[in-house]
Image (spheres, grey):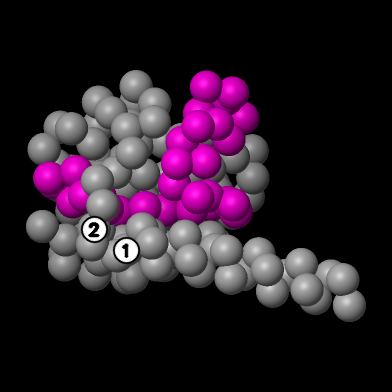
Amino acid sequence: MARIVAVIIVSVMLAAAVSQAQAGNPSAPLSTPGIKQIVTSGKKTVIFFLNPNGGPCRAQDEVLTRLQKDKKNTFNIAYVNAMQQENQQAFYDYGVRGLPTVVLVDSSGKINRMFPPGIQAYEALSAALDGCK
């Protein structure tokens, strides 16, 4: 019973974080020097929260790399590694609680979409990038 309650609480908190990130398209937090440099470049950015040793994260990276190649580098990828202590603040700022997590930031630095944790399909990411300014 306690497990079910914990799962429900975590789900509600995640949904709130996602809806808050999408509400009014807030500016993307510039939590790390890498995020700041890439998000302020003037191109669309995919912020990719990952553990480079995890199978799902490696699979998501393959999808993002293929997508970037197919879209002829029309967007940047900012990698936020869970294994690096200096990236911890970014996980808090974006409300990331599961990996892999992908956040789409438009060219003006506003959060366009925060995907739920898990591997996102090539088609879904491609459509989201096409709909992002």
- The residue that appears at 59% across and 52% down in the rendered structure is 97
Residue sticking out furthest to the right: 1
Left/right placement of residue 23 relative to residue 16 reads left
Q: Is residue 79 left or right of residue 111?
A: right
**The image quarter in which residue 42 lies:** top left
Residue at left offset 69%, top offset 74%: 8
Residue 109 image point, x, y percent = 19, 43
Q: Nearer the viewer, residue 6 or 103?
A: 6
What residue is disc 1 on? 22
Instruction: Residue under label 2, please give it.
Output: 25
Tell me if residue 22 can be seen: yes
CB within 8 Å, label 2 to label 1:
yes
Judged left or right of residue 120, residue 100 is: right
Asked if residue 66 can be seen in this view, the reply is: no
Q: Mark 2, residues whose alpha carbon is within 10 Å: few (<14), some, or many (≥20)? A: some
Magenta residues (range):
82-111
Residue 118: horizontal and vertical position, in percent?
54, 61
Q: Secondary structure at mark 1?
A: helix
Above or below for 105 versus 37: below
Comparing 125 with 69, the one in front is: 125
Total numbered badges shown on the rendered structure: 2
Q: Residue 38 is drawn in which quadrant?
A: top left
Local crowd size for mark 1, using a 10 Å CA cut-off: few (<14), some (14–19), many (≥20): some
Residue drawn at (78%, 73%) of the image: 5
Residue 14 % position (x, y): 54, 63
Residue 124 is covered by the magenta coloring: no
Q: Is residue 62 above or below residue 13?
A: above
Of residues 64 and 24, which is closer to you in this image?
24
